[in-house]
Amino acid sequence: PSRSVPADEDLYAVGRALERAEIDALLVVGGFAAYVAVHRMWAVRDRYPAFGLPIVVVPATLDNNLPGWESAIGADTALNVIVQSLDRIKQSASASRRCFVVETMGRSCGYLPMMAAIATGAERVYLHEDGITLRDLQVDVERMKASFRAGRTFYLTIRSELANPLYTTDFLAALFAQESDQLFDVRTAVLGHVQQGGNPSPFDRVLATRLTSRAMSVLDEQFEACLLYTSPSPRDGLLSRM
């Protein structure tokens, strides 16, 4: 399943599968779970020699939560979809004296909601990194009402999917509607899996090509390094030791 990491008791079976399939190298394309899984395999390569084969991970996740990367493959495409959706919401509701609470993906990383908020001029963004407090909501409600009294016709609020386990998107919408003093109405939009799939952006296409090309070069370098050693092939070791 998605985002699953092999448990310790599964590593032997994974190693045997690699040996039986005569896998000589692994190019893993994935997100944080892929990083953790590969690190777990690397850490036990002395115990399971099948994991001593060349391995390279290509970062690909719309959450963009991987260490060492400014932009993983998929993040730019997802951001473009979010911005397009928010632009359409703004165009359709800008004359309605309305507050929209929009939920985006990103899990515990605030990259997607924050970048989308900046790109679309959102008035407020709630992130997992900052959390949400009751005091925050009190201040936000008062600011919202003051802006509508001053003539605002549209107020955009973006909430990261894991910003707070209790202050959900529906909760925020209900709170804002209750405290609106009939100055505005409130709608919600959970973008959900519309942020996934679709045609990748040009940036993501070029990034994927460059990273995959580099990954293949690294695998070649690792193969060349392996030729310097006279030890048996990794696939010769695991089954003979068990």
Image (cartoon, rainbow, N blue to C red):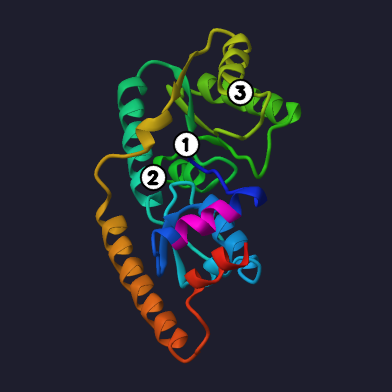
Is 151 contained in the magenta span?
no
Residue 47 visible in the picture:
yes
* Element class at badge 1: loop
Inter-mark Cα distance, 2 to 1: 14 Å
Rendered location of residue 148, percent (x, y):
51, 21
Place residue 23 in its image quadrant: bottom left
Q: Residues within 10 Å of mark 2 (few under 14, many from 20)?
A: many
Rendered location of residue 56, percent (x, y):
45, 68
Q: Residue at x 27, y 51 (%)?
A: 201
Q: Residues within 10 Å of mark 1 (few under 14, many from 20)?
A: some
Amino acid carrying mark 3 in the image: Thr
Which mark, by number, is residue 168?
3
Amino acid carrying mark 1 in the image: Ala
Q: Are marks 2 and 1 in contact (CB under 8 Å)?
A: no
Q: Are marks 1 and 3 in contact (CB under 8 Å)?
A: no
Inter-mark Cα distance, 2 to 3: 21 Å
* Element class at badge 3: loop
Nearer-the-camera pick, 76 or 141: 76
The label nearer to you, 2 versus 1, is 2
Rendered location of residue 205, percent (x, y):
27, 57
Q: Report the magenta residues as a range.
A: 12-19
Amino acid carrying mark 2 in the image: Leu
| 239 horizontally vs 121: left or right | right
Rendered location of residue 83, percent (x, y):
36, 39
Nearer-the-camera pick, 84 or 20: 20
Nearer-the-camera pick, 234 or 133: 234
Reading the image, the residue beneath label 2 is 79
In the displayed structure, would residue 221 be above or below residue 199? below
Nearer-the-camera pick, 84 or 97: 84
Reading the image, the residue beneath label 1 is 122
